[in-house]
Image (cartoon, rainbow, N blue to C red):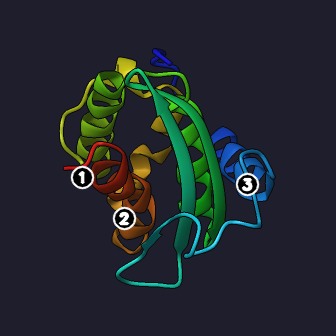
């Protein structure tokens, strides 16, 4: 996932919309009774997810997401980025992602395609949409 490619606004927009519409990782049968749930504090975005960890490696992730394009795309792209990664790698990526979203200095080489969300720091109303997945990772996967 290490890449410091710079994406144009059009490329970023296309990637966001493609992942927003994608059914990849989707399982519409997931609900609050059989999966982990994370709600937005500010809007209707809702993340419902199951995951499997074997030997500290994330082996499987399924989601049932509802919400805006920034939320759904950031969640799907982040989950795809951490599949088959160690919890240590997930934690490192998540810390750098939070720095990026908050407008702080971050390791651009770690972000890969997630760097398309670098501009979120300029749009406060989208900040909470882009950090739901990060908060979920902290609470449910890394158990912070």
Q: Are marks 3 and 1 in contact (CB under 8 Å)?
A: no
Q: Which residue is mark 3?
A: 17
- What is the secondary structure assignment of the residue under circle 3? helix
Residue 104 visible from this viewpoint: yes
Q: Residues within 10 Å of mark 3 (few under 14, many from 20)?
A: some
Q: Residues within 10 Å of mark 1 (few under 14, many from 20)?
A: some
Q: Residue at x 53, y 76 (%)?
A: 45
Q: Earlier in the sequence, mark 3 or mark 1?
A: 3
What is the spatial separation of the Cα atoms under label 3 and label 2, in whole angstroms? 17 Å
- What is the secondary structure assignment of the residue under circle 1? loop
Above-or-below relation of 90 to 140? above
Q: Is residue 80 left or right of residue 139?
A: right
Residue 19, given in percent of the width and then of the height, sits at 71, 49
Q: Residues within 10 Å of mark 2 (few under 14, many from 20)?
A: some
What is the spatial separation of the Cα atoms under label 1 and label 2, in whole angstroms? 8 Å
**Pick the front one: 75 or 144:** 144
Q: Which residue is mark 2?
A: 127
Q: Which residue is mark 1?
A: 102
Q: Are marks 1 and 2 in contact (CB under 8 Å)?
A: yes
């Amino acid at each position: 996932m290490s890449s410091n490619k710079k994406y144009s606004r059009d490329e970023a927009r296309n990637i966001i919309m493609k992942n927003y519409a994608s059914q990849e990782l989707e399982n519409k049968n997931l609900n609050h009774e059989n999966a982990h749930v994370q709600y937005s504090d500010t809007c209707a975005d809702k993340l419902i997810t199951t995951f499997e960890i074997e030997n500290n490696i994330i082996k499987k992730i399924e989601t049932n997401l509802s919400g805006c394009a920034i939320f759904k795309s950031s969640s799907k792209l982040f989950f795809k980025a951490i599949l088959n990664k160690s919890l240590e790698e997930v934690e490192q990526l998540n810390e750098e992602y939070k720095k990026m979203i908050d407008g702080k200095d971050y390791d651009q080489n770690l972000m890969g395609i997630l760097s398309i969300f670098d501009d979120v720091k300029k749009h406060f109303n989208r900040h909470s949409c882009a950090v739901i997945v990060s908060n979920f990772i902290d609470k449910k996967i890394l158990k912070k």
